[in-house]
Image (cartoon, coloured by chain):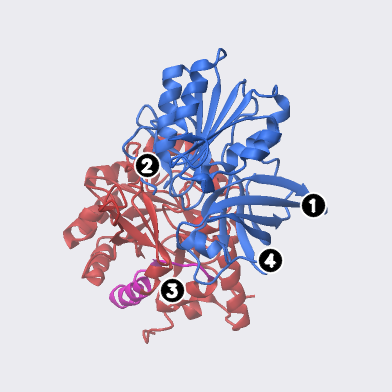
Chain colours: A blue, B red
Amino acid sequence: MYNQYCSSVTRNVRLKGAYYVLTLEYTPTADHGEVVPGQFVMMRPRLSGGPLLPRPMSILEWREKPGGKAQLDIFYKVHGAGTDLMTTLTVEHQVDLLAPLGNGFPDEIAGPVLLVGGGVGIPPLVNWARELHQDYEPGSIHYFVGGRTHKDIFFDRQLERLRCKVHVATNDGSRGHHGFVTGPLETVLTGLDASPTVLTCGPMAMMQAVAKLCETHGATCLASLEAYMACGFGVCLGCVVPDKTGDFIRLCVDGPVMDTSMVDIHSEYLGGLG
Amino acid sequence: MTDMTTGFGKVQLRNPIMTASGCFGYAKEFHGQVDWSTIGGVVTKGISPAPREGNPPPRIYETPQGMLNAIGLQNVGADGFLTEKLDYLREIDCKVMVNIYGKTVEEYVEVTEKLGDVDGVDAVEANLSCPNVAAGGIEFGTTIEGIEHITIAMRAATKSTLVVKLSPNVSNLGELAKAAEASGADAVSLINTLRGMAVDIQRRKPILQNRFGGLSGPAIKPVALAQVFQTYEAVTIPIVGMGGIMTGSDVIEFLMAGACCVQVGTANFIDPQASQKIATQVQEWCEHQGVEKVDEIIGALHSRS
């Protein structure tokens, strides 16, 4: 059950470049429940001059803490006024949270599992791998991570330590495969005997290309999508995406994780987010 | 303890706080978040005769101290409302107003006949002001004749309390409010959103797929207050005020400008408990100020006795 919480900032650290991790702490209510990888929160810092509306943020990690508390890590990249303001958050600050929201990835996913992420889209995938890697044979989880340069690649070594097979791709060739992340993905999809499940999150163009590859190779593709969202709990009707029948479905409550065979991921209406 | 009761038509509200149409779904979305006994009432999403899919996305965008929306009245339709939504609304301990939208006079009448007098519905609000649909709604709401047609037809179709929701996108709001009053409306509600636009300069395109959207949130509060104030001078029927209400003191401003009660809209997106918290703040302010009855402050800015 989602609820509104006033959280406090525990940490707000820069990893490298424009990428940061913000840690928030709050006291969940009894009906809060477990957080499923792929779920998200709406967050609104209590800062003067901040945005009016809360922003949807994916969860890098959620953990219970002593004393009935919980902590939440949010991985973000500075790319506008809102995220720029987020970097000014310190332990002095409070952040309004609505959590947990959305469906998340399914409980049981038959292996092999291919995680395909790009840019700031990696948190739900990393979260999933950290939570569930022990349920899988070593090497049956693949982590494909793409970025513009080597400075946009994160959590590759961590997931390697969790015995995931890691495939890095950069647009400028400064690390791993020179090109899009779909290059190494296609190679692996072609070579696999068993039918894999692909979990993807990242720029819309990347997810569209991943979904197309999955269609070609008969793989299930679960994409964690993004949209402008005002409320996060199904009321504003702002975050709709078209399904295969042309109906509009709400990302916040019916998603954000969608089976790409159900949603019209190639719709002209998607991809409006810069 | 301040007597917070207020109302319009046959509707008696325990306090002046309602929720605004389009910002509160069908109330069930707020189950467990809002204690229904703490607010005056709720207003449903606009209901049309048949279900509507709404506009293609992107549908919303944040602007300075506000947001644009072009949802396009996505709703379950009158029959869907009766079968899927009404049961919950019957159970909640506050008043229920159904917002009604049609493309033609006949469509307004059809929904009003279906929903106006059913058990669980205390009032109907004619949506003559949605800026986001191609036909109907605001088409009627911007002319005296249009408002007269719809109001008279809906008045004949139900015994329920009838509220006419007006648009700020006009130059003669007072005249339009008078037309609603003369045609049998029990109250007018205002303001709906202000028509607006946002531009993606990289793509050289409007951000909203619908190009235009309705602006809501704190950015529009001063406009709304002025419109409520002016309308109060024009009509004698009660005014339901709204536009950018985020706090209890915002509500007091609307009451003083002439609203008998208010609707909280965009604030519900930011905090699902906003309506309840605002109601508490209004109560606390009144008690702190020694207000015996909330009536005392309604229209306090006016010299009318």
Mark 3 → mark 2, Cα distance in angstroms? 40 Å
For the residues labelled 3 and 1, the Cα–Cα distance comes to 42 Å
Q: Is residue B59 above or below residue A217?
A: below
Kindly identify the residue that appears in the image at 60 percent across and 29 percent down.
A106
Q: In this view of the protein, which residue sits in the foreground, B102 or B64? A: B64
Q: Amino acid at mark 4?
A: Val
Classify mark 2: residues with Cα within 10 Å, few (<14), some (14-19) or many (20+). some
* Residue B267 in sight: no
Q: Position of residue A188 (x, y in %)?
A: 52, 22
What residue is disc 1 on?
Answer: A68
Residue at the spot of label 4: A91
Sequence-wise, the earlier of marks 2 and 1 is 1
Q: Secondary structure at mark 3?
A: helix
Q: Residue at x 55, y 23 (%)?
A: A197
Which chain is indicated by disc 1? A
> Quadrant of the rendered structure where residue B38 is?
bottom right
From the top left corner, tell me how far across and down residue B110 is, in percent: 30, 41
Dots 1, 4 in contact, CB < 8 A: no
Q: Which mark is residue B254?
A: 3
Magenta part of the chain: B223-247
Dot in front, 1 or 4 = 4
Q: Under tag 4, what secondary structure?
A: loop
Classify A247 as above or below A98. above
Front residue of B92 and A171: A171
* The N terminus of chain A - image quarter: top right
